[in-house]
Structure formats: structure tokens, C-alpha cells
Amino acid sequence: MWETFVRKVKLVFEDETLRKRILFVLVALLIFRLLAAIPIPGINAASLQAFLNNNQFFGLLNVFSGGGFSNLSIVMLGVGPYITASIVMQLMTILIPKLKEMYQEEGEAGRARFAQYSRYLTVPLAFIQGFGFLLLLQQNGIIPALSLFALITNVTVIAAGSIFLMWLGELITEFGVGNGVSLIIFAGIVSRIPRDLSQTVFTFDVSQLPAYLGFIAAAMVIMAGVVFITEAERPIPVTYARRVRGMKVLGGISTYLPLRVNQAGVIPIVFALSFLLFPQMIATFLSRASIVWLATGAAKVVAWLQNQWIYGGLYFLLVVIFTYFYTAITFEPHQVAKNLQKNGAFIPGVRPGGTTAEYLGNIITRITLVGALFLGLLAVLPLILQGVTGITAITIGGTALLIVVSVVLDLVKKIDAQTSIREY
């Protein structure tokens, strides 16, 4: 195994095309990190840090912006609008049959058009999100009151930064290695590690050494669990019927259909946080209203949602629900059964058509339960660790950890595929 690893690493550096692709990714990520260090003017750093610490939604936004939101950089929205647009487009496939047909039945061309519509939707979403966040931050005293011209200028710059990152991610996907948008998020998460480690060192307490050691052991176990669940799949045996055409005998081979335990990835966590914390944002706005009863009711809603037990319970439940919901969107047993029957394939012991669809539906329902419970536990993991250890300086961010592991696994697979092609 070690000799294989050394041979592949050597091939990466020796092959000019692959070396250029990796270099392109590194240069693109360096440009992203430089942009993330350029802040908009007039920031109250102390108020911004306190605001981020007390708001889980903006903490997630900071993850997807690659840390750009923590210093209100010109790319403070990161790829958040593009991710939101992609989620909206996925949901629209339920309401618009033509979009569903384009995404599932028209092949690569249909998916390319679908992705283009997502890019178009990203532009207005970037302007709307930029405007809303600036108003909210201005309301909380993090940035000074802006004139109309300054507000329009800042919104335009912030939206342009998000659109530029979307374009940069597409370039990485096309000319580099791996998924560009995922790599941008990954680079932002990894860039925060030195700062978090330094904060841990400065707040180190010898009396809490057992808790720190337990934290490290838990981190190793959780990381192994994330890798296991991310890679876990249920293979469904598939056999192709034997057909005779002239002098040739086609088919008769056996393969398998892989059903992933975690079909939805990190999307259910994003859905759940948006669904749970968007009302909190609205309530925060309304808590400063001039109408007394409205402000009082909004303040009670904010206090209720900030209760860790209530927040954690709702968060876990919503992640489980949205895991099933998103899996139902992305995996349709009837369509899979139809494609198998069209290609002359069948599952041994199961009749083609409706029976196959029912069989696949039952399996995906059972294995999704494992993935849903795992994602729910991973989502509330930071809250559990804070409650058990009492250490707020270090936490294992469930969403960030899942993204990092998924991106690393995908990147390793892509590089391994590239090297295998060149070896042969």
C-alpha cells in the first residue's frame, strides 16, 4: 500500500497536465483567501465577534463564506447565494415537472442547463442577501449608518464578490481537480484551524486536561464515523438479461446498484438551520419594532429559540425529516426501476417494474434512517460537547467536519482516478 501511495504521488508531480491542474487549484484558493482578508470599512470588531458567537445562523454562514463573514470581507457571502439557489432549484423540481424531466432524464445536457438556471438565480439572491445582512448588521451597531449611495455601493460589491466566487468555483471544477465550490468552502474551514488552535492554547487550563484528552479521542472516533457513514453503501445485485443479436450474445453479466447510506450529504443540515433560524432573524428584526406587543412577542420568540435544549431538539428532528425529504427528491425508486427495465436489467428474485420500485423504496427508507440519525447527531454534536465538557473555546463543528471529510475523500478519489488513467 505504501509503495502504491508513493508511486501515485510521484506520478502527480511528474505528469505535467495533472501538475498544472493542482497548481491552478492552489492559485485560485490563494486568490479567494486574499479577497477574504479585504474588509468593508467601518466595522466594530468587538460587536461583530459577539454577534457571531450568539447567532448560530451567521456562524453557519461564516462556514460557507470561508471565514469571510467573520471580518465582513468583500466576499462575506461566500458561495452561500449559489448554494441557496441550488437548493431552491432542487425544490422547484417538485413543483415544475419540466425541471424534473430536465434534471433526471435529459442527461448531461439537461443537468448543464439546470446548473445554468441555478447561476442565473444566484445573481438576484446575492443582491437580496447582501442588502438584508447589511441592514441587520447596521441595526445591531456592527457597521455605521450608511447613506443610500454607500448602501448601494456596498451591496453591489458584496454581491459581485459572491458571484466572482461562484465563477471561480466553476473554473476550479473545469480546469482543476475536484468540485470548485466544495474546495472553496473547504479552504475557508481549514484556514480557521490555526486561529482556533491558538485560542485553545491561550485559554488552556491544566485542570481541564482530562476533558481536552477526551475531546481529542472523541474527535478521532467521530472523524472515523464520518468517513464510514460517508462511504457506506448498500449494494443491490443487478443482472442484465442475455440477448442474441446476429452472431453476438449481449448481456448476461451481473453487477450491483450502490445505494448510499447518506444520500443527502450535508444538505439536510443546511435546510434545517435555515428553517429553524430564519424565524429567529425575523424575530430579531421585529423585537426592535415600535409596536409594543409586536416587539414583546418577538423578543419571547428569540429567547425561546435560544434555549439550548429546545434548539437542539428541534434541530435534530428537522435534520432527520429533511434527510428523508431530500433523499426522496434525489432518488426516485420508480425512475430507477424504469431505467433498469428499459435496459433489460433486473434484480434477482424481484419482478421488474412496480415490484422493483417497491423493493428499492423499502431498502432506501431503512438505510436512510441510519444516515438521518447520524446527520442529526452530527448536527447537535457541538451543543452536546459544550454541555458535557463545559469548554466553549473548542468544539467539533458537525457541519464543518462533514464538509471537510467529504471534500477530502472526493478529492483523493479524483486524483486517484487521474493517476490511474495515466498509469494505463
Image (spheres, rainbow, N blue to C red):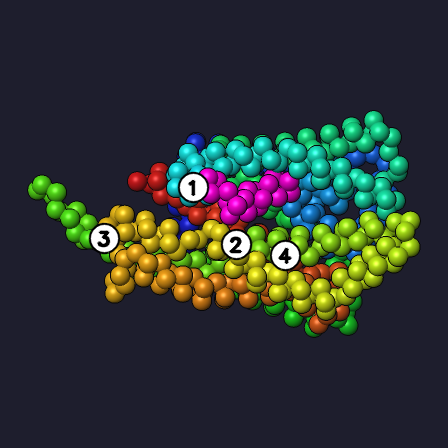
The residue lying at 44 percent from left, 53 percent from top is: 331
User: Which circle marks residue 101 in the picture?
Assistant: 1
Residue 186 image point, x, y percent: 59, 46
The residue lying at 49 percent from left, 58 percent from top is: 262
Give the side of residue 343 with respect to residue 258, left or right.
left
User: Which circle marks residue 272 in the picture?
Assistant: 4
Vertical arrangement, residue 208 with respect to residue 33, above or below = below
- Dot 2 surroundings within 10 Å: few (below 14), some, or many (20 or more)? some
Give the side of residue 175 with respect to residue 148, left or right.
left
Give the alpha-carbon distance from disc 1 to disc 2, as whole Å: 17 Å
Q: Amino acid at mark 4?
A: Ala
Looking at the image, is mark 3 or mark 1 nearer the viewer?
Answer: 1
The disc, 3 or 1, on the residue closer to the chain's N-terminal end is: 1
Question: In the structure shown, which secondary structural element does the residue marked by tag 1 occupy?
Answer: helix
Residue of label 3: 240
Residue of label 2: 326
Q: Verify CB contact (< 8 Å) between mark 3 and mark 4.
A: no
Q: Verify CB contact (< 8 Å) between mark 3 and mark 1.
A: no
The disc, 1 or 2, on the residue closer to the chain's N-terminal end is: 1
409 inside magenta stretch: no
Quadrant of the rendering where the N terminus is positioned: bottom left
Residue 348 image point, x, y percent: 25, 62
Question: In the structure shown, which secondary structural element does the residue marked by tag 2 occupy?
Answer: helix
Vertical arrangement, residue 228 with respect to residue 47, above or below = below
Residue 167 image point, x, y percent: 58, 32
Looking at the image, is mark 3 or mark 2 nearer the viewer?
Answer: 2
Q: Main secondary structure of the magenta part?
A: helix
The disc, 3 or 4, on the residue closer to the chain's N-terminal end is: 3
Give the alpha-carbon distance from disc 3 to disc 4, as whole Å: 41 Å
